[in-house]
Amino acid sequence: MLLTACKASFWGPYCQGIPVPINTTAFIPYPAFSKRLQRLKTSLGAPPPPEVIVEYCEEEDFLNEFIKLADEVEDMYPAVIVLGNPEGTEARKGAFEVSLGGKVLFSKLESGRIPETQEVLDALQPELDNS
């Protein structure tokens, strides 16, 4: 069976229109995206999942911290999706702000430090229980 070849990028595959065998590794996107995509496929028709929003400063290279946090949160809470710097918003300098439903769970701008993963998980649990 042949499908359209796709290249992997951070947010997933983008197609180039080249037929390739289905068993090729060209179809394997970024691992965290694969988990997100699988959860979304299995929940079609379900209400939208809770979204944890992380605003992080790209100038200070907080991308690795964001990926680590997103993976840990999504591993602990499979029904949650973690989004970083949503489209249409610009991250503030020095920011690493974590929120759920508009409620700030952690603020680097206030605390002056990056959160420990467990701090975010602990703050997230009661919020998910209440929703």
Image: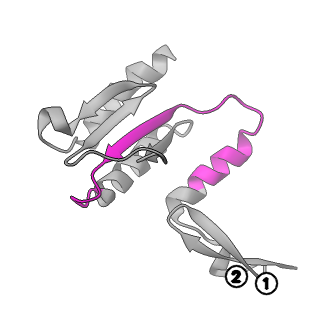
Q: Is residue 59 magenta?
A: yes
Q: Is residue 36 left or right of residue 109?
A: right
Q: Position of residue 71 (x, y in %)?
A: 42, 51
Residues at circles 2 and 1 in contact by the CB criterion of under 8 Å? yes
**Which residue is at a point 58% across and 72% down the rendered structure image?**
8
**Which residue is at a point 23% across and 34% down the rendered structure image?**
107
Q: What is the basis of the colouring in this image? A: one colour
Q: Position of residue 49 (x, y in %)?
A: 59, 33
Where residue 40 sits, quadrant-wise, is top right
| Residue positioned most to the right | 1
Q: How many numbered discs?
A: 2
Q: Position of residue 57 (x, y in %)?
A: 27, 52
Q: Is disc 2 placed on a helix, strand or loop?
A: loop
Q: Is residue 96 magenta?
A: no
Q: Which mark is residue 24?
A: 2
The magenta stretch is 35-62
Where residue 29 sits, quadrant-wise, is bottom right
Amino acid type, label 1? Pro
In the rendered image, which residue does mark 1 sit on? 21
Q: Which mark is residue 98?
A: none
Q: Residues within 10 Å of mark 1 (few under 14, many from 20)?
A: few
Q: Is residue 129 left or right of residue 48?
A: left
Where residue 1 sits, quadrant-wise, is bottom right
Q: Position of residue 27 (x, y in %)?
A: 67, 73
Q: Is residue 30 above or below residue 6?
A: above
Q: Residues within 10 Å of mark 2 (few under 14, many from 20)?
A: few
